[in-house]
Structures are given as structure tokens and as C-alpha cells.
């Protein structure tokens, strides 16, 4: 999502600001997965659209997150190593795109449970000179042999194993970003090599240790052995502990090959091919309804060939043509929109969330779903937002009141990078392999395959809360599953300055968290450092209660329950992780959300 603000207002002066808000323009990049990112808009605009008393809960005592102020450039990622790598790229003359690419390779090494080249990305790029934003969609895509009901007979196969793997898009997206929008000053290899070094050894952190139960859950299954042994200490025979050094030499080797490649897309997505009878034999065992198509095996020499061999040997359905035909979707246009009024803060925020999440079931890849396109148009339409705002009552209503479409599938497991360079360009990049450790399948190349196919809906499968699935997100070859990823950049069209860069990780909670980040940064004038400390609220309609983080004000919580009929629930879980950069007084403030527990901290100069 791209938000354009048009104002000379002093953001610290809330009152003045509120008057001027009417003048603000918001531009929404029309995205190609369209979808969920636009729900952010619904939340923010609905909050905006309401008048009443606003509770600004300013009880920040001790900061738990690391934040910093920089004059020239700022970066934050899921690991401090990756933020520093991004900063170094900018100091060496690279731009925000180069920096984000280097940080993404790094994130893939240090947070392999969340991201990597076995997965996919959403990248929003702001080009200051042109005052223009670009959206790159390199999300995993359903293979050509995928079918709507492919998981009907074996639900587990949508999450675990090679059948759950969508065509990986990450490397394609990063190379596309580099070719089209990189500085051309920094060679490609310099962006990949720092990650290569880290793959040879980096210290284990709590964020990853927290997810080892996702591996031990499959104990005794031979398919999990690759992944289990990668993260098991040879000395203790147990999973690595925080601080112990972890190495992934196959990944280091792969990254070196990618670093030195003249065309990594050729290497990873192509490869010469020949037909092989044996393919049909192996392939018969897969659950696909479309066994007549004989997959092709390429001759040795390319990574593509290795991937296809792995697929064939393990019942996966991705073919060489799927890899060859993969494309990063690039979207350039955006539209200007206006925002209005004020809000009774938390109540309105919660109501806005319910109304937004209530439409999620209509979201999906708009190239394949008419209703998704229609909803996307609605969500960027002033009249529709007004209509939504009018549905915010002073009291919480019944579930049915908010439900425009059956709630969508769950999604999770992402990684975020936010960067501004010293020319004022910016990148917000969210990448993912879906659930923790993706399909749990470790490629011989050292990366983990995504299980993004599980983000689709399947006809007849009621979801977690008993709702029927909606057609907007059914599996179809070439289609990309609905996502909550919401990389966002806000800029002022007059000065061209970036006002905010943000984005987050945490599945469906990303939407409400990023919306709160924007509401705080734009409407309340808070800095990145303040924004990450504030306790967050989350209501995705199902379950029909509002989760609040533990340090949320007791007083406000009580008021919400008593005066607004809200059902509140404290949680000790993080309500997503956000990496905001804000700009004020010619200075960037950048913060690394403490909730990640990955030893993250920002960098800049
Ligand atoms: C979009 O808005 C129109 C008019 O308000 C409405 O009839 C239609 O159902 C909406 N579609 C979606 C998918 O929200």
C-alpha cells in the first residue's frame, strides 16, 4: 500500500493536524494480489472518519525495543546483522533497493523458519526523483498441475511435505528489483555475499528456538530428518540453544553460486529440458488429478533441474515449465484519495478492524477473481469507505453485522525489511515461506521449501471457525494465494519526502498491526520508537473478541467492555511485529520491534 500525504502540518501539533487532515490525500497503489493490503485502508480511513473522544494511551515507561535516529539513511530488518548489511550497502553507494535485497538474502539465512528463497515476497519501492511507487509481487504461485480439490483427501499434505509447495518467487522478485530499480553502482554479488558469510555461521536466537516444536512435532517421520539434523547440535544431540553457532553449508554454497551468477533467474528458474519416461512413473504417486501431463527433467547444471528432481522424487507437482513461466508482477499506478475526520480511538479502531476483516473472505488473486477486484475497487472508493464508517456504532454489534464474506484462511510466518536511503528512496519488503519452517522440506541446496499452498481455500473444507470457504481464494494453476503481507510506504507528494515506511510479520495480525502503526504515525504524530512500544489491539472478527497485549491500560480496557460492549481478552502473545521508519524534523527514527526476540536492532547513518 502506498499512502501519499499532502500537508505542511506540524505532525506534533495534533489539533492543527486534525484540522488539516481533510486536506490529506491518500494514494493507494493498485496491487496485483490486491487484497489484504487494502484492508489496511479500510481500517485507517474508518478510524479517521469518526468523531468523538480520543484516548491516546501514552503510558510508555521503559522502551523494550531498540530504536535510533539517523540523519541520512535508516534500515531495520529481522536481524541486526541484516540491518547493518543494508546500512553498509547504502554507505557504499547503493540505494534502498540494493539495501533491501542484501537484507532479504540475510533474513533468509538468519530467520530461515520465516523466509528464504524457497518462499516469496511483496516489495513496495518508492522512487523519490519520480515521486512514484512501484509494487513487485513475487509471491508463491499455484503450479500448473494444482487443482481446487487437491488436498481434499489428505489435509496434512496442504501443510507438510512437497505437495504443499507453491512455485517459489523470492529470487525472481529480488533479481527483477535489482535489474529494474537497483543503483547499478553495487554489483549483485556484493548484495548476496554477506548472507553467504552468515550462512557459514550465525548465533541462534530465541525467535527461532521458539519454533523448534514445529519440527519435533513430526518426530519419527523420515521426511523431517533433513531439517531436524540441520538444527541439531552434533555435540549434544539436541536443538541448538540461544547463542550457539549454526551453520548451513549447502545454503552458503548455493548463495555463492547465486552471487557469482550473471543471471540468477536463468540459473534457478530455467535449465535445458528433456522428456523422461521415468518422470511419469514417479509422478503417478502424486495426488494430482492431472497425471497425463508428463513433467520434464532438465539436464544437470542448473538449480532448476535440481529442484525438479527433488519435486519428482518426493511427490511434488512443480514442473520445469512452472519455474520457467514464473513472473514477478510489477504494478506502477496509484490513485489519489482523501481522508476525513477524527475517531474515538480504540473503539473505532476495533470496529474498523471488524468491518475490514469481515470482508477478507472476498479477497484473493484479482487476476482470477472478479469479486476480489470489485472489493479492491470498493476499498479504494470514498463512498464505500464512508458507508463502512457509518456502520461504526457506539456499541459493539453482533458478529453477523460485520460479516460481508466468510472469514478467510489463516496465514503466518513472514519477515520484514524497511529501508530509506540517503537519496530519499525507500523500500518496504515482506517475504514469507508461510508457516514456521514452511513445508518442513529442506532442499539439498540448503533452503526450506514454502507451504504457501495452504493459504488457498479448498471447497467443502470449513475453516477453523466453521465457516464455508469462499471462491475468491480457491486453488487454480497460476493463481497466487491470498496474503496478509502489507508492505507500506507513505510519502508527501509536494516535498517528495518519505513520511513513513512500515510493514510487519505475524499472519492475519499484520493487517491490524500495520494499520495501527499508520494511525499512530500519521494521525497521532508518534515516532517509530513510540509506535513499536504501544500495546496493540487485534480483532479479526473470528474469534469474536479483541485481543490486547499485556501492558494495555486496564482502565481503557474496562471502559471498552463497560461503555462499548467490547469483548476484550489479554494475550501474552505478540500481536504481530512491525518495523516502522518515521520522519520528523529532517531526521529518520527507526525501530526494531522487541516482540521478535531475534536480537534485532536498527542501523543507519
Ligand atoms: C462493492 O460495492 C457495491 C456498491 O456499494 C456493492 O454492491 C458490492 O457488493 C460491493 N462488492 C464487494 C465485493 O464488496
Image (spheres, grey):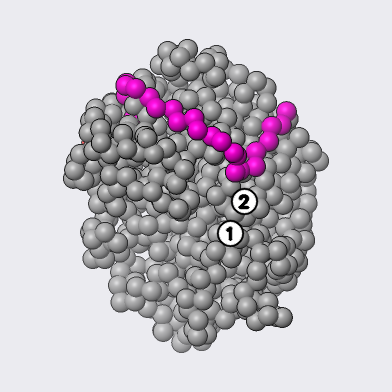
Q: Nearer the viewer, residue 64 or 488?
A: 64
Q: Nearer the viewer, residue 301 or 64?
A: 64
Q: Nearer the viewer, residue 576 or 432?
A: 576
* x 34%, y 67%: residue: 147
Residue picked out by circle 2: 78
Indicate left or right for 496 with 331 as reference: right
Of circles 1 and 2, which is in front? 1
| The C terminus, quarter of image | top right
**Helix, strand, or loop for circle 2?**
loop
Indicate left or right for 362 with 93 as reference: left
Indicate which disc residue 207 carries. Answer: 1
The boundaries of the magenta stretch are 46-71
* x 61%, y 43%: residue: 65
Q: Nearer the viewer, residue 206 or 152?
A: 206
First along the sequence among labels 1 and 2:
2
Q: Are marks 1 and 2 in contact (CB under 8 Å)?
A: yes
Predominant SS of the magenta segment: loop
- Residue 142 position in % (x across, y down): 43, 62
- Residue 117 position in % (x across, y down): 60, 61
**Cα gap from disc 1 to disc 2, whole angstroms:** 10 Å
| Residue 360 to residue 237: above or below | above
Q: Is residue 333 magenta?
A: no
- Residue 286 position in % (x across, y down): 41, 80
Amino acid at each position: 500500500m502506498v499512502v501519499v500525504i499532502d500537508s505542511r502540518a506540524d505532525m506534533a501539533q495534533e489539533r492543527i493536524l486534525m484540522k488539516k487532515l481533510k486536506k490529506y490525500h491518500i494514494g493507494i497503489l493498485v496491487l496485483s494480489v490486491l487484497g489484504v493490503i487494502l484492508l489496511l485502508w479500510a481500517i485507517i480511513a474508518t478510524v479517521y472518519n469518526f468523531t468523538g473522544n480520543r484516548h491516546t494511551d501514552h503510558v510508555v515507561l521503559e522502551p523494550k525495543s531498540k530504536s535510533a535516529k539517523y540523519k541520512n539513511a535508516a534500515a531495520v530488518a529481522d536481524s541486526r546483522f541484516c540491518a547493518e548489511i543494508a546500512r553498509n550497502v547504502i554507505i557504499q553507494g547503493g540505494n534502498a533497493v540494493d539495501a533491501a535485497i542484501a537484507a532479504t538474502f540475510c533474513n533468509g539465512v538468519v530467520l530461515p523458519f520465516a523466509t528464504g528463497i524457497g518462499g516469496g515476497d511483496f516489495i513496495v519501492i518508492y522512487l523519490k526523483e519520480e515521486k512514484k511507487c512501484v509494487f513487485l509481487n513475487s509471491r508463491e504461485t499455484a503450479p500448473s498441475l494444482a487443482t481446487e480439490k487437491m488436498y481434499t483427501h489428505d489435509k496434512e499434505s496442504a501443510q507438510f511435505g512437497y505437495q504443499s509447495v507453491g512455485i517459489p518467487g523470492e529470487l525472481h522478485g529480488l533479481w527483477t528489483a535489482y535489474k529494474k530499480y537497483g543503483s547499478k553502482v553495487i554489483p549483485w554479488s556484493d548484495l548476496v555475499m554477506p548472507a553467504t558469510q552468515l550462512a557459514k555461521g550465525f548465533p541462534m536466537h530465541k525467535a527461532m528456538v521458539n519454533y523448534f516444536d514445529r519440527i519435533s512435532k513430526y518426530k519419527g517421520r523420515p521426511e523431517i530428518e533433513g531439517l531436524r539434523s540441520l538444527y541439531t547440535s552434533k555435540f549434544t544431540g539436541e536443538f541448538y540453544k540461544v547463542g550457539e553457532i549454526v551453520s548451513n553449508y549447502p545454503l552458503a554454497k548455493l548463495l555463492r553460486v547465486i552471487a557469482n551468477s550473471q543471471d540468477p533467474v536463468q540459473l534457478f528458474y530455467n535449465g535445458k529440458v528433456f522428456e523422461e519416461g521415468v518422470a511419469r512413473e514417479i509422478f503417478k504417486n502424486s495426488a494430482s488429478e492431472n497425471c497425463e501431463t508428463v513433467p520434464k527433467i532438465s539436464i544437470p547444471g542448473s538449480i532448476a533441474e535440481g529442484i525438479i528432481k527433488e519435486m519428482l522424487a518426493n511427490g511434488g507437482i512443480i514442473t520445469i515449465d512452472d519455474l520457467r513461466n514464473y513472473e514477478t508482477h510489477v504494478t506502477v499506478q496509484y490513485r489519489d484519495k482523501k481522508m476525513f475526520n477524527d475517531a474515538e480511538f480504540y473503539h473505532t479502531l476495533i470496529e474498523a478492524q471488524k468491518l475490514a476483516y469481515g470482508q477478507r473472505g472476498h479477497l484473493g488473486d484479482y487476476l482470477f477473481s472478479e469479486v476480489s477486484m470489485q472489493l479492491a475497487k470498493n476499498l479504494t472508493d470514498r463512498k464505500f469507505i464512508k458507508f463502512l464508517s457509518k456502520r461504526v456504532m457506539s456499541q459493539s454489534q453482533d458478529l453477523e453485522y460485520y460479516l460481508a464474506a466468510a472469514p478467510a484462511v489463516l496465514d503466518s510466518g513472514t519477515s520484514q525489511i524497511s529501508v530509506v536511503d540517503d537519496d530519499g528512496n525507500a523500500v518496504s519488503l515482506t517475504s514469507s515461506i508461510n508457516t514456521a519452517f514452511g513445508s518442513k522440506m529442506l532442499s539439498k541446496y540448503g533452503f526450506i521449501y514454502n507451504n504457501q499452498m495452504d493459504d488457498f481455500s479448498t471447497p467443502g473444507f470449513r475453516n477453523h471457525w466453521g465457516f464455508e470457504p469462499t471462491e475468491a481464494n480457491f486453488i487454480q494453476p497460476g493463481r497466487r494465494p491470498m496474503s496478509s503481507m502489507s508492505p507500506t510506504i507513505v510519502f508527501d507528494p509536494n516535498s517528495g519526502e518519505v513520511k513513513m515506511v512500515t510493514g510487519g510479520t505475524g499472519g492475519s495480525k499484520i493487517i491490524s498491526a500495520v494499520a495501527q502503526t499508520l494511525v499512530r504515525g500519521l494521525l497521532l504524530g508518534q515516532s517509530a520508537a513510540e509506535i513499536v512500544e504501544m500495546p496493540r489491539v487485534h480483532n479479526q472478527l473470528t474469534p469474536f473478541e479483541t485481543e490486547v497485549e499485556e501492558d494495555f491500560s486496564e482502565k481503557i480496557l474496562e471502559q471498552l467492555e463497560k461503555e462499548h460492549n467490547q469483548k476484550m481478552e489479554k494475550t501474552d502473545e505478540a500481536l504481530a511485529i512491525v518495523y516502522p521508519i518515521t520522519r520528523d524534523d529532517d531526521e529518520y527514527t527507526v525501530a526494531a520491534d522487541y516482540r521478535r526476540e531475534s536480537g534485532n536492532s536498527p542501523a543507519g547513518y
